[in-house]
Amino acid sequence: MLTYKTPNRHGYSVKFSPFNPGQLVVATSQYYGFAGGGTLFVLEITPSGDLIEISKFQWTDGLFDVSWSECNPGIVATASGDGSLQLWNLTNRQFPLEVFREHSKEVYSIDWSQCRGEQLILSASWDTSIKLWDPSSVLSVGTFCGHSKLVYNAVWSPLIPSCFASVAGDGLLKIWSSNLPNRAPLTLHSHNAEVLTCSWCKFDQNLIATGASDGLIRGWDLRYFAAPIFEQKGCEYAVRKIQFSPHYASTLASVSYDFTTRIWDYRISCEAIEIIKHHSEFVYGLDFNLNRKGEMADCGWDSLVRVFTPSVLNNVTK
């Protein structure tokens, strides 16, 4: 396991580069995100097996999420507590390439479209709105309103063009088309609690999972919303983030306020197949390495970034 400490900064989001298997970025906040500034760390796994900092970027407010460009290996976007988004060139250590300012409250989620031909960014905010951005313009190209409480997460479908999902404090999962800003074609009351995270399956375009403050993870089939097709139990506190594996169809991971990172296989059990306890505070960020099967990263409020391969993923087949 590789470890890097972000001094005086608390981790909110970690993402591996889709281009370089040994590079990752970490969005962090000062004073746990309640006050102070934010720092974007660019880390690299060296050939000798060390996790080192190669650069960092400062912002005047906390950074809550980060997403890589899907067409340029040197560009990332971040989401901030001051309601703005920043576009960074990782070869320029001074200032953002662009700053997008339309949200009136914290931006908690940012996602860059993975579908070919769509270079669009989603932002989800505590102002209850979701906005769609073209990186070449400072003005948003669409605003999506439908949630009644804080929107915690909005993510593009990796398989369906122009489709994205959102979850919020109102307990709802909504499925949207970026071409229809006035309504969500599908809406589901997915939890009797705040829904903090969602993730699309990378192998089945109809499968999406949600994680909530009730400690539950539920899987949903877009063709049948009457009941979840699976429910994973075991987290003692809120599920902060979930993510489906890009390599194993029925595997997903979660991080939680109970200080754990858990690996699940919904076809095997409703309980975690591995529980990892290597943080001493809330675990916030989570990512799978697209280019190295089984490798993961997480980060938390204890200022630690961990890169590791869970033992159960060493021998899992697709």
Image (tube, rainbow, N blue to C red):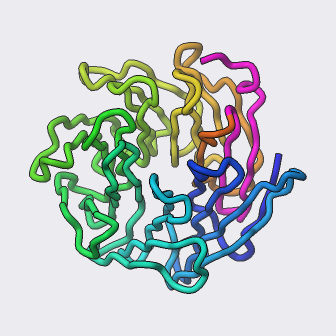
Q: Tell me where the magenta segment starts and ends, as one range.
A: 293-318
Number of dots carrying numbers = 0
Left-right relation of 123 to 199: left
Q: Is residue 194 visible?
A: no
Q: Is residue 1 left or right of residue 8?
A: right
Instruction: Work out which residue is located at the far right of the displayed protein and give it.
Output: 48
- Tell which of 283 and 205 is nearer to you: 205
Let me know if residue 259 is in the magenta part.
no
Residue 88 percent coordinates (x, y):
50, 73
Image side of residue 252 versus residue 220, left or right = right
Q: Quadrant of the C terminus?
A: top right
In the rendered view, tell whether residue 257 sits above or below residue 190.
Answer: below
Rendered image quadrant of residue 152:
bottom left
Q: Is residue 163 above or below residue 6?
A: above
Quarter holding residue 151: bottom left
Residue 308, how many percent across, how many down?
76, 42
- Residue positioned most to the left: 182
Magenta stretch contains residue 301? yes
Q: Nearer the viewer, residue 316 or 215?
A: 316
Closest to the observer: 253 or 308? 308
Give residue 27's position: percent from left, percent from top. 57, 66
Q: Residue at x 34, y 60 (%)?
A: 123
Is 82 situated above or below 125?
below
Q: Residue at x 59, y 31 (%)?
A: 234
Q: Residue at x 60, y 74 (%)?
A: 91
Q: Is residue 58 above or below residue 103?
A: below
Q: Residue at x 47, y 32 (%)?
A: 217
